[in-house]
Image (spheres, rainbow, N blue to C red):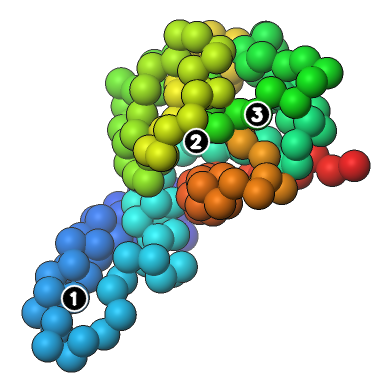
Amino acid sequence: MDDAKRETVFRTCESITRRLVPALAQLESTASLLQQPPLAGREWFEVLRQKLVPQLGEQAFLVVAVVGGTNIGKSVIFNHLAGCKASASSPLASGTKHPVCLVPEGFTQHHSLQSVFPDFELHEWSDASSSLEEDDAHQIFWRTAKELPPSLLILDTPDVDSDTRVNWVRADAVRRCADVLIAVLT
């Protein structure tokens, strides 16, 4: 298959896939009398909505999340990947409550961060302590990092071994958004 034909096939698939989510929502509404469980929360639907649809288009990108337990060095690895000291790190457990994300320059001009992270409220990140504040809302603090390649987003995440249930919910939402999980283990 030549490049032109491949591009045509890709654009057709992209168009069909983009129309699929609203069509499924319409079907769910129309079929409500059948009392089926909602689409929201079903793994296949969440991956379609949170992962596939946001990444359709000409400018592919990679979402990498650094995940792991309490005080295990996630922020150190995150900073290393970022090429700068972006996230606070110390020998004491800092208790990150919300993911933080570094975004390459120009990314938000071509992509919607809200569609990449649909389960989170997005806040521009100006203070490293913002992610340490307790809040029931699922938030991601983000900022632009000139050190990043143009197709890479990286996240530093809350502890997955916490007894705080909200961290588990946030970890699951990050998992659905990320292409790569870097698990930091002891």
Q: Residue at x 71, y 48 (%)?
A: 161
**Kind of residue at disc 1:** Glu
Q: Secondary structure at mark 2?
A: loop
Whether 186 is drawn above or below 80: the answer is below
Of mark 3 and mark 2, the one earlier in the sequence is 2
| Residue 71 pos. (x, y %) | 78, 31
Q: CA distance from mark 2 to mark 1?
A: 31 Å
Point out the image quarter for the C terminus: top right
**Kind of residue at disc 3:** Gly
Q: Residue at x 39, y 66 (%)?
A: 41
* Tag nearer the camera, 2 or 1: 1
Q: Which mark is residue 42?
A: none
Q: Which mark is residue 61?
A: 2
Within 10 Å of the Cα at label 3, are there few (<14), some (14-19), or many (20+) other Cα atoms? some
Judge by depth and name the residue closer to the eye, 102 or 140: 140
| Residue 158 pos. (x, y %) | 61, 36
* Tag nearer the camera, 3 or 2: 3
Within 10 Å of the Cα at label 1, are there few (<14), some (14-19), or many (20+) other Cα atoms? some
